[in-house]
Amino acid sequence: MFLLNTNADYRQPLDPRDAEILGIEAADAVERHLTFRENHAETPLVALPALAAELGVGSIHVKDEGHRLGLGSFKALGGAYAVIRLVLEEAARRLGRAVDVSELHSFNVREVAETMTVACATDGNHGRSVAQGAQLVGARAAIFVHAGVSDERVAAIARFGAEMIRVDGTYDDSVREAARIAEEKGWTIVSDTSWPGYERIPGLVMQGYTALVREALRAMPQPPTHVFIQAGVGGIAATVAGHMAIAFGDNRPTFTVVDPARAACLFETARAGHPVTVAHGEPTVMAMLECYEPSLVAWRILSRVADAFMTVEEDEAIAVMRRLADPAGNDPAIVVGESGGVGLAGLIRAVGNPEIQQALSLDRHSRIFLVNTEGATDPGKYEEIVGLSPAAVARKDRTGASA
């Protein structure tokens, strides 16, 4: 399914709150914060010239977040950043003075953090980031996971010392349960989705994601003309689209949001013109995108700066995982998790459909930007789908890694 953005807010300026969250100064602050993270390194921007030629576009660049901060996904940038910001703000309140990120590991900050508990619901990746952030500063973490989260993903979160709480039902059920329990116990919810009355902290999570956009734009030989980004509740899509709208103004790239067909909450929201909850049916292999209700902040941004919305099927996501593990020509192999290559799946569907191709003005001059949002965060599942272990794929020639 495909539709162009026809919402009343389309091409209107960003809400001032969102422009502040995703603006240049905010992104500068995120990048400064990362200099105090011990295992920080910029992730690679990978050029895929053979695939670009095959698809009939000018270039394809993929920001590969598969090893971000040792957590395996872009989510490493958001949850931990929000936790650290909240701890520093609480320390400033209690100490009665400004507290800089350079004091992150000081006794005073740790003493405050040890009195705090942060909580969230997760499909896997966001919870890992929140748990890591809590461990870094000495806070407690309680992570709520729904029935569909694999034991391997649960174990990957628990290794950061988080309390793991299983919840029956879907991701959205776990979000509600986390909010209820946190209210009862006085915990701080650090969610990557937003709802009425709860926007600031999800905004901080999204702000953390701006770092990957800044890194990519510095590394690209030319600015992109087209962006395809996958969406769960919409946080990463809104961050990339919103920051690029600020950075490029009227010259921003054409932006397409890609949903799993089985969890197309943003596509259906765009079709309805207002946030909607979609029915929970058969689970999708794109587990990190299995969300049935959009983030209100993300929709407020995307309603203005996304140009199109589309869905992809299960087999298309799987085909991309295999295609990037065994690439064309001299393109490097990329380890892409079940949800990581969904933007590329959208591009492939778009260039294969003349009507979509024309609607998006895709041609041999188009410069495509994509984000591999996760590596093999469940290595067993990855090997089952691809037929090779993540390590075997990673050992393949990566000479195509490019700035």
Image (spheres, helix red, strand yellow):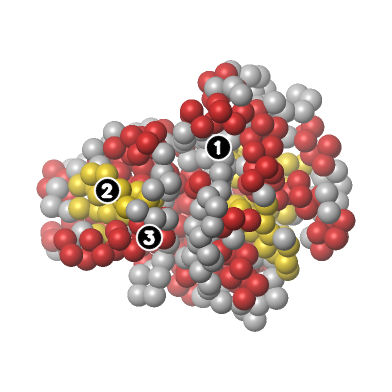
Relative to 130, 397 lies left or right: right
Residue 161 picture quarter: top left
Are the residues flagged by discs 3 and 1 in contact, CB closer than 8 Å?
A: no
Please tell me whether residue 274 is drawn above or below residue 376 in the rendered image. Answer: below
Identify the element where label 1 is drawn.
loop
Q: In the rendering, at what x and y percent does residue 335 appear?
A: 58, 31
Residue 269 picture quarter: bottom right
Q: Tag 1 or tag 2, which sits nearer the N-term?
A: 2
Quadrant for the C terminus in the image: top right
Q: Residues within 10 Å of mark 3 (few under 14, many from 20)?
A: some
Q: Which mark is residue 312?
A: none
Residue 243 picture quarter: bottom right
Q: Which mark is residue 337?
A: 1
Identify the element where label 2 is drawn.
strand
Amino acid type of the residue tagged 1 in the rendering: Gly
Amino acid type of the residue tagged 3 in the rendering: Asp
Name the residue beneath numbered marker 3: 173
* Label 3 vs label 1, nearer the camera: 3
Name the residue beneath numbered marker 2: 165
Measured in 3D between alpha carbons, the distance from the residue under mark 2 to the one under mark 1, in whole angstroms, is 24 Å
Which residue is rendered at x = 49% and y = 75% of the image? 16
Q: Tag 3 or tag 2, which sits nearer the N-term?
A: 2
Please tell me whether residue 217 is drawn above or below residue 199 in the rendered image. Answer: above
Measured in 3D between alpha carbons, the distance from the residue under mark 3 to the one under mark 1, in whole angstroms, is 24 Å
Which residue is rendered at x = 40% and y = 70% of the image? 195
Q: In the rendering, at what x and y percent does residue 277 appear?
A: 51, 69
Asked whether 109 or 315 is in front, the reply is 315
Which residue is rendered at x = 56% and y = 77% of the image? 274
Q: Residue furthest front?
A: 282
Q: In the rendering, at what x and y percent does residue 300 appear?
A: 53, 72
